[in-house]
Image: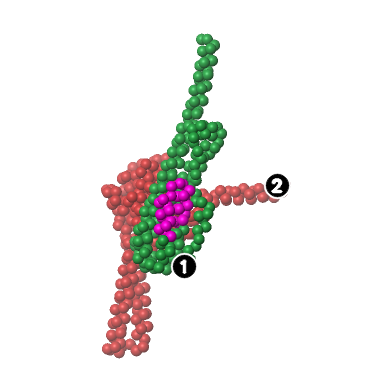
């Protein structure tokens, strides 16, 4: 009887399910209780999250500027720009009067990144600069799926820029320009390879150590090896720095954690100051 | 109290209530109209910004691509149209023309790796993309404001008051249909 009833209304249930699916389809993510970090794609470590939360709280206390990081699994079929502007306004990032909010948005499936700037920050962060910051500090990491490194480094880049430009009395970590470093190590690798090639050539010519005819292969092979080796060394150094740096900022954070008055966690759950964005910023794929 | 006085008070009260309602409606229409104007100025600011970026872009690009005069000229022309446009529709149409002219340029840029990777060009491209996105956002905000205003002007009973005080429907920021199929530039 009951089953018959169920089978009779199954289309209705299906319709309801579809409806629920459809209405869900364009829903934006909601701010989490941390507000400053909303890791919906689940790719950030807790150290990264703590780092951002600590820093963002200090920045907010200093002059009301809010930097928010959001990662999402996908954009629900919206364009990156639309999604970012809607999210920015829904969250109300930044002060309502000053509109000094900044949104760093990562869309995992689309492999896209956007920096969205509130009206009030457009003066110190013009679109061109946000694009350059992405190229130099964020995108090279994201290409290698190094989410934590990319987000932390990018966050520090924007954080320090705001602190410097607005003359705030806050400590900041200088970000690494990874793009430039990559290029210098690549050049160094090529030069080392080249010198190695010359040495081998000289050895062969004057001492007859290596059999003739293979010198070019040796040369290329060594270039290749040195290229790889130098990249590994480079990564090792970078990772070591990141490790030390996250450790340092972690201990740093707990120090500040004791002195933050909980003014934030105490408020009613809506952290956004009602700031708005007019769609300024820049987008990148990675 | 006399009967006449009571009736008088009643009439005055009714008139006062009606006047207040009319006043409220009038003020509502005024503030909606002002909202539309303010959103319109937001668009205008961004359109101006876009127009200001073009000469810089043209100068940067010219050095790299001397043979693409056709495309560069089409951009300059579209910019002139945008600067001289006065009505909402003209501005929207000119803006769309400029967008397609720029898109043609960005396609061709793929053939000039030096230009594509130059810091100056990347910077300009970001600025232009940001401005374009701002225009899209401002346009949406403007159209929302116009929609809300137009609904007030057209609906009963506000439409009576709107007609009395000369509130007219406002135009959406939309390009003319004909401009949407801009002829492709042949290479």
Q: Label 2's element? A: helix
Viewer-proximal residue among A222 and B60:
B60
Q: Is residue A66 left or right of residue B24?
A: left
Viewer-proximal residue among A98 and A247:
A98
> Over which residues does the magenta segment extend?
B74-99
x and y percent of residue B172 in the render?
Answer: 50, 46
Q: Which residue is mark 1?
A: B187
Q: Residue at x 34, y 67 (%)?
A: A182
Q: How many marks?
A: 2
Q: Which residue is mark 2?
A: A5
Badge 1: few (under 14), some or many (20 or more) residues near its Cα, within 10 Å? few
Badge 2: few (under 14), some or many (20 or more) residues near its Cα, within 10 Å? few
Q: Is residue A1 left or right of residue B79?
A: right
Q: Which chain is green?
A: B
| Callout 1: chain | B
x and y percent of residue A152 in the render?
Answer: 36, 57
């Amino acid at each position: 009887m009951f089953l018959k009833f169920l089978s009779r209304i199954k289309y209705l249930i299906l319709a309801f399910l579809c409806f629920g699916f459809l209405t869900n389809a364009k829903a934006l993510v909601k701010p989490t209780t941390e507000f400053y970090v909303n890791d919906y794609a689940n790719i950030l470590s807790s150290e990264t999250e703590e780092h951002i939360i600590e820093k963002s709280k200090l920045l907010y206390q200093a002059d009301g500027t809010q930097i928010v990081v959001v990662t999402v699994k996908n954009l629900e079929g919206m364009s990156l720009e639309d999604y970012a502007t809607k999210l920015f306004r829904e969250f109300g990032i930044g002060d309502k009067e000053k509109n000094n909010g900044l949104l760093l948005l990562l869309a995992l499936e689309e492999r896209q990144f956007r920096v969205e700037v509130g009206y009030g920050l457009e003066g110190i962060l013009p679109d061109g600069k946000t694009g350059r910051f992405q190229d130099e500090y964020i995108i090279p990491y994201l290409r290698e799926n190094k989410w934590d490194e990319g987000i932390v480094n990018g966050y520090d880049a924007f954080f320090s820029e705001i602190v410097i430009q607005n003359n705030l009395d806050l400590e900041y970590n200088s970000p690494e320009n990874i793009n430039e470093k990559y290029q210098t190590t690549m050049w160094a690798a090529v030069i080392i390879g080249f010198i190695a090639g010359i040495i081998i050539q000289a050895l062969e010519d004057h001492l007859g150590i290596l059999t003739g005819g293979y010198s070019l292969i040796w040369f290329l092979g060594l270039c290749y090896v040195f290229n790889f080796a130098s990249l590994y060394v480079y990564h090792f150094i970078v990772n070591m720095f990141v490790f030390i740096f996250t450790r340092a900022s972690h201990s740093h954070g707990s120090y500040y954690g004791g002195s933050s008055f909980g003014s934030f966690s105490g408020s009613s759950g809506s952290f956004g100051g009602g700031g708005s964005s007019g769609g300024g910023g820049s987008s990148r794929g990675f | 109290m006399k009967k006449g006085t009571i009736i008088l008070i009643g009439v005055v009260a009714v008139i006062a209530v009606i006047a207040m309602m009319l006043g409220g409606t009038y003020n509502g229409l005024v503030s909606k109209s002002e909202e539309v104007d303010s959103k319109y100025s937001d668009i205008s600011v961004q359109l101006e910004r876009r127009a200001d970026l073009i000469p810089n872009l043209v100068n940067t690009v010219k050095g790299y691509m001397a043979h693409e005069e056709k495309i560069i000229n089409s951009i300059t022309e579209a910019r002139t149209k945008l600067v001289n446009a006065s009505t909402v529709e003209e501005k929207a149409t000119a803006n769309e023309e400029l967008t397609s002219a720029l898109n043609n340029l960005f396609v061709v840029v793929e053939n000039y790796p030096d230009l594509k990777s130059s810091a100056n060009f990347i910077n300009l491209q970001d600025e232009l993309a940001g401005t374009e996105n701002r225009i899209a956002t401002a346009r949406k905000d403007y159209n929302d404001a116009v929609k809300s205003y137009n609904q007030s002007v057209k609906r009963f009973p506000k439409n009576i008051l709107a007609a009395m005080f000369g509130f007219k429907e406002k135009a959406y920021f939309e390009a003319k249909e004909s401009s949407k199929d801009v002829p492709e530039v042949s290479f």
